[in-house]
Image (cartoon, rainbow, N blue to C red):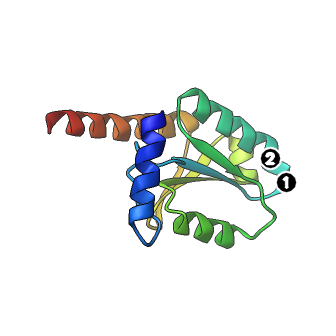
C-alpha cells in the first residue's frame, strides 16, 4: 500500500496535469454520483458493496448539477463513474460511465464488479508477462 502511494505521488509530481492512471493504479477507481438527496442511502449501499470487493471508491453527495459533477470527475481522471438516481434506486441498478465520456448504460452492481475485476485481472496478466 505504501509503495502504491509513493509511486502515485512521484508520478503525479512529474507531470504538469493530473496523470491518467489505469484502473488498477488509480487512487480512486470509482466515483459514485448521487443525483438527489432521495437516493443517498442507495448510493451509500452501492459504495459499501464496491468497497467490500476491494475497490477504491468515493461518494459524491455535493449539491451541484449532474453535468457539473460529471465534468468534475472527468477532470479528476477517475476511471469509472456510477450515477445513482431515482430510477436506479427503484430498480436496484446503476448507470455507469467510463472516463472519456463513454456511457456504458444501466446495469446491476454485480455486472459492474465483474467488469472491473476482469479489467484489473487483465492488467495483472499483462504486467506479469513483461
From the viewer's perspective, is residue 55 above or below residue 94? Answer: above
Q: Quadrant of residue 4?
A: top left
- In the rendered image, residue 88, in percent from the top left (x then y), is placed at 68, 48
**SS of the residue at dot 2?**
helix
What residue is drawn where x is 54% and y is 48%?
28
Total numbered labels placed on residues in the image: 2
- Which residue occupies 23% across, 34% down? 125
Q: Position of residue 31 (x, y in %)?
A: 60, 51
Q: Position of 55 compared to 83: left or right? A: left
**Please, is residue 112 above or below residue 75 in the view?**
above
Please name the residue that numbered disc 1 is placed on: 37
Residue 85 visible to the viewer: yes
Q: Foreground: 53 or 7?
A: 7
User: Which residue lies under the disc numbered 2?
Assistant: 40
Tell me, yes or no, whether the two marked residues, 1 and 2, touch with CB atoms within 8 Å: yes
Local packing at callout 2 (Cα closer than 10 Å; few below 14, some 14-19, many 20+) is some
Q: Residue at x 37, y 38 (%)?
A: 120
- Helix, strand, or loop for circle 1? helix
The span from disc 1 to disc 2 (Cα, nearest Å) is 5 Å
Residue 16 location, x and y as percent? Answer: 43, 72
Amino acid at each position: 500500500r505504501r509503495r502504491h502511494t509513493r509511486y502515485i505521488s512521484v508520478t503525479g509530481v512529474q507531470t504538469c496535469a493530473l496523470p491518467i492512471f489505469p484502473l488498477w493504479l488509480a487512487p480512486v477507481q470509482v466515483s459514485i454520483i448521487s443525483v438527489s438527496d432521495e437516493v443517498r442511502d442507495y448510493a451509500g449501499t452501492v459504495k459499501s458493496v464496491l468497497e467490500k470487493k476491494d475497490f477504491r471508491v468515493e461518494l459524491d453527495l455535493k449539491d451541484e448539477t449532474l453535468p457539473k459533477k460529471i465534468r468534475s470527475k472527468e477532470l479528476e481522471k477517475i476511471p469509472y463513474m456510477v450515477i445513482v438516481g431515482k430510477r436506479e434506486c427503484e430498480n436496484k441498478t446503476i448507470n455507469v460511465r467510463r472516463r472519456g465520456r463513454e456511457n456504458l448504460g444501466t446495469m446491476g452492481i454485480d455486472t459492474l464488479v465483474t467488469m472491473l475485476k476482469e479489467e484489473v485481472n487483465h492488467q495483472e496478466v499483462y504486467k506479469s508477462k513483461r
